[in-house]
Image (tube, rainbow, N blue to C red):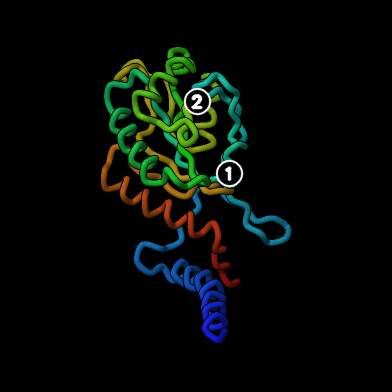
Amino acid sequence: MQNSNRKKALILILILLVPSLLYLVLSTGTNNFKPLLIYGPKEVNANGDTLYHQIPNFVLTDQNGIEFTNSYLDSNIYVASFFFATCPTICPKMATNMLQVQDRFRDRKDFKLLSITVNPEHDTPEVLKEYAQKVHAMEDKWTFLSGDKDKIYDVAFNGYFVSAQKDSIAPGGFLHSANIILIDGKGRIRGYFDGTSASETNDLFDAIEILLVEKYVPRKKKRK
């Protein structure tokens, strides 16, 4: 009986201590667990709360021809990239590194991947479906989007703050960012990582781990 009570007490202590230890690690920035920056413009409301930039609402079409809105990603951590299926240069390498991210976090139901084409006239849902199969994307984990060109370019520039445009002198006829963008569960930008770089992909792994911890451990508020 005493052993049973001791075990229960030990479990209770661990439950109470683990969140505190995680918070301490995040707050002090020990090793890789330093709280991530929040990117983009911000403002302070009448209550003194800081309001950060969030990805604006958008509606596009996924690789299955189904309407997709980014509200479906609420409370999920995700990484976003821009690409096009016939890209002859950086896209294949970006897809390889995105696949590594998918495989690393494949068992996390609160983590997703998003790839948005910058050439929607060619990259129909049917084309994206074939592309997704080609890069071994898991359908419930990695979503590919197409839709209205102007809407895509607008959300790239004004939402994710990356380039996306038609460019006759660019390889393949389109210019887009090589960055993979990390978004937290509140739709805020938390990092930019070179999608063609193996070392930055490893940095992205660390950043995702931090956000997964941060999701359950609140950020330490700065003293006024």
Residue corresponding to mark 1: 54
Labels 1, 2: front one: 2
Q: What's the distance in space between the residues labelled 1 and 2, CA to CA?
A: 19 Å
Residue at (50, 71) in percent of width and height: 18
Q: Quadrant of the N terminus?
A: bottom right
Q: Nearer the viewer, residue 125 or 173?
A: 125
When the figure is inspected, residue 193 is found, relative to residue 166, above or below; the finding is: below
The quadrant in which the C terminus is found is bottom right
Q: Position of residue 207 (x, y in %)?
A: 40, 53
- Under mark 1, the amino acid is Gln
Q: Is residue 192 above or below residue 174?
A: below
Residue at far bottom of view: 2
Q: Position of residue 92 (x, y in %)?
A: 29, 28
**SS of the residue at dot 2?**
strand
Give the side of residue 3 with respect to residue 165, left or right: right
- SS at circle 1: loop
Q: Residue 68 location, x and y as percent?
A: 58, 28
Q: Which quarter of the figure has residue 25?
A: bottom left
Label 1 crowd (10 A; few <14 / some 14-19 / many >=20): some
Circle 2 sits on which residue?
145
Q: Is residue 40 visible?
A: no
Q: Count the marks: how many?
A: 2
Residue at 51% in and 59% down: 214
- Disc 2 residue crowd, few under 14, some 14–19, many 20+, Cα 10 Å: many
Q: Earlier in the sequence, mark 1 or mark 2?
A: 1
Q: Is residue 156 above or below residue 174?
A: below
